[in-house]
Amino acid sequence: MNNKTFYFFQALIALVIIVALLFAAAYLLEARAKNSPTPETGPISALDACQLPTSAVKDDTTINFQWRQVTVRADSTTESVLFFTSANNDFLCQAWRDTTGHYDSVVTSMGVFQATNGTALTYEIGIPPQGTDLAPTQLIIGQVPTGTTEVEIVTSDQEHRDATIGHGWYLAWVSLADSSTKVVEIDALGADGQNLTYMLNPGGLSVGDTAAVSN
């Protein structure tokens, strides 16, 4: 065997070894990918993301909840807000979706309220905008009087916003021009557009404000 033939066979053997190594590496990578755990994603249902509690302990007493499926709800492109009631207890859930549509971040809170039984307009919950928000919004929740078909919210820069109404409650995201903008008026309107009652404070309304319906 001459030198040329010897070197040819050496090169051929080296090439075969390289190809075999490449196939082995590809096989190992594929096997590792199959065995790797699938990344966990959140639920696609806001209701599932909220994880409603069935009970709670207060002053050594267990309170069992019977939440209304959803009392009132509002959705945006990235966030859902769900509000639930059980007797005089309330449960607020704010859930944010990721780019795949799964809810990956949830904030919940629970409180108590005094039922007005449809006799008043109230301002029960007010979550102010965060200081880092580029487009600040304020979340407002309250009870509505019987016969209310529309709730209109007015800010200090004279912007008018409509709220979502459900089961005797209203819920609204109110866009604010900046952090100094305040909610100054909330109106409860009937089917004929008549103002059933309203809350008004040019200096800004506060949680706890209420307005009874005039007889």
Image (tube, rainbow, N blue to C red):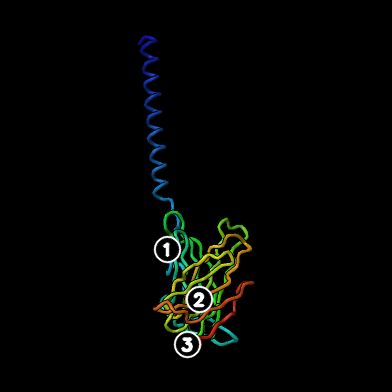
Q: Is residue 203 above or below residue 42?
A: below
Q: Residues within 10 Å of mark 3 (few under 14, many from 20)?
A: few
User: The residue tagged with tag 3: helix, strand or loop?
Assistant: loop
> Mark 2 falls on what kind of element?
strand
**Along the polypeptide, which appears first: circle 1 or circle 2?**
1
- The location of residue 77, given as percent across then percent down, is 44, 59
Labelled pair 1, 2 in contact (Cβ < 8 Å): no
Amino acid beneath label 3: Asn
Residue for badge 2: 187
Q: Position of residue 189 (x, y in %)?
A: 45, 77
Point out which mark residue 43 bears: 1
Q: Between disc 3 and disc 2, whose residue precedes?
A: 3
Q: Nearer the viewer, mark 1 or mark 2?
A: 2
Q: Which mark is residue 78?
A: none
Q: Nearer the viewer, residue 107 or 147?
A: 147
Disc 3: which residue: 117
Q: How far apart are labels 3 and 1 at the CA level? A: 35 Å
